[in-house]
Amino acid sequence: MADNFPHRSHCPINYALESFGDKWTLLIIRDLMFNDKESYGDFLASGEKISTNILADRLKRLEELGIVTKGVKESNRSRVVYSLTQKGRDLLPIMLEITRWSGKYDANTYASRSFLARLEQDRDKLIAAIRAGW
Amino acid sequence: MADNFPHRSHCPINYALESFGDKWTLLIIRDLMFNDKESYGDFLASGEKISTNILADRLKRLEELGIVTKGVKESNRSRVVYSLTQKGRDLLPIMLEITRWSGKYDANTYASRSFLARLEQDRDKLIAAIRAGW
DNA sequence: ACAGGAAATTGCTTTTTGCAAGCAAGTGAC
DNA sequence: GTCACTTGCTTGCAAAAAGCAATTTCCTGT
């Protein structure tokens, strides 16, 4: 959890942008959080087609920031697996509010009606339910 | 509200990233939402030192996306003023969850204790109170 | 008409991204 | 053991975006 680079400011919005304010980082977090992905290859296979050098860079950065940890699979110790730390899991409310906003404004959103309805009607219970699965 | 560029996907996270997934856009939204800024010069004066060409580009983009509207001040019709649309104001819950996360993990955060406490204790009331001021 | 300020635009350099190819380490079949 | 295969990266290079300083345009009040 390095975090020892010069900050533009300690505005909370800016702190977040310096952590995950780019076009790719939140997609990796999404895959870890909602799509049961855990390996380099898993992330590469996502629909948005991240390139290998960017993926490697972002995973390294997320590790340095303490949002993700790197380990190996017990069943196959050559397989590298990434997972969210508490700091990473705490991004859940942000991810859900983003989903709500995009669900409202993107006419072609992939987010399902039922999920959006659940989010609208009882956000707190939905958060609790997801956390219970961790 | 153009939105007619090729999307990487219609994943809600990705849609949001394509709207404001860069190092500067959310700072402009922050200034409009919380800091009573409205003009080009106001945004330029913010602590993070955005450069003029990037600012002009992002304002244009935000307008195209329907998040911000551009107008002129009645009292001085040479003065351009920007303001949030409903789509922009609907980013409030995201902004607050980001503030909460950064407030938790940035030891040097600018976010005040009292604001963070209010956010923790009654998020919904805080949102309602801010909306009431719009 | 002119001075002044606000809102950009332009030109140039540096940094970051995107893409394809290559490579190293571990594993599984034989 | 060795050889093909998979996984997890690294490298090189071209293209795009960001950063920075200087310049310009467009009001507008005097």
Image: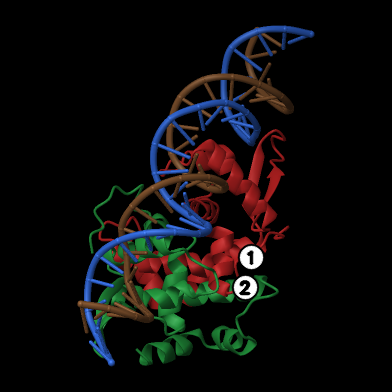
Chain colours: A red, B green, C brown, D blue
Residue of label 1: A7
- The answer to whether residue A63 is above or below residue B20 is above
Q: Determine whether label 1 and label 2 are within 8 Å by CB.
A: yes
The quadrant in which residue B87 appears is bottom left
The residue type indicated by label 1 comes to His
The residue type indicated by label 2 comes to His
Tag 1 secondary structure? loop
Using the numbered discs, state the Cα–Cα distance from disc 1 to disc 2 in whole angstroms: 7 Å
Residue drawn at point x = 40 percent, y = 71 percent: A119
Is residue B50 or residue B100 the one in the foreground? B50
Q: Chain of mark 2?
A: A
User: Could you tell whether D8 is left or right of C20 in the image?
Assistant: right
Tag 2 secondary structure? loop
Report if residue A79 is visible in the image: yes
Q: Quadrant of the C terminus of chain A?
A: bottom right
Residue drawn at point x = 69 percent, y = 34 percent: A76
What's the mark number on residue A10? 2
User: Could you tell whether A115 is left or right of A7 in the image?
Assistant: left
Q: Are marks 1 and 2 on the same chain?
A: yes
Report if residue B22 is visible in the image: no
Is residue B31 or residue A55 the one in the foreground? B31
Q: Chain of mark 1?
A: A
Residue drawn at point x = 64 percent, y = 86 percent: B113
Is residue C13 or residue A2 the one in the foreground? C13
User: Could you tell whether A81 is left or right of B48 in the image?
Assistant: right
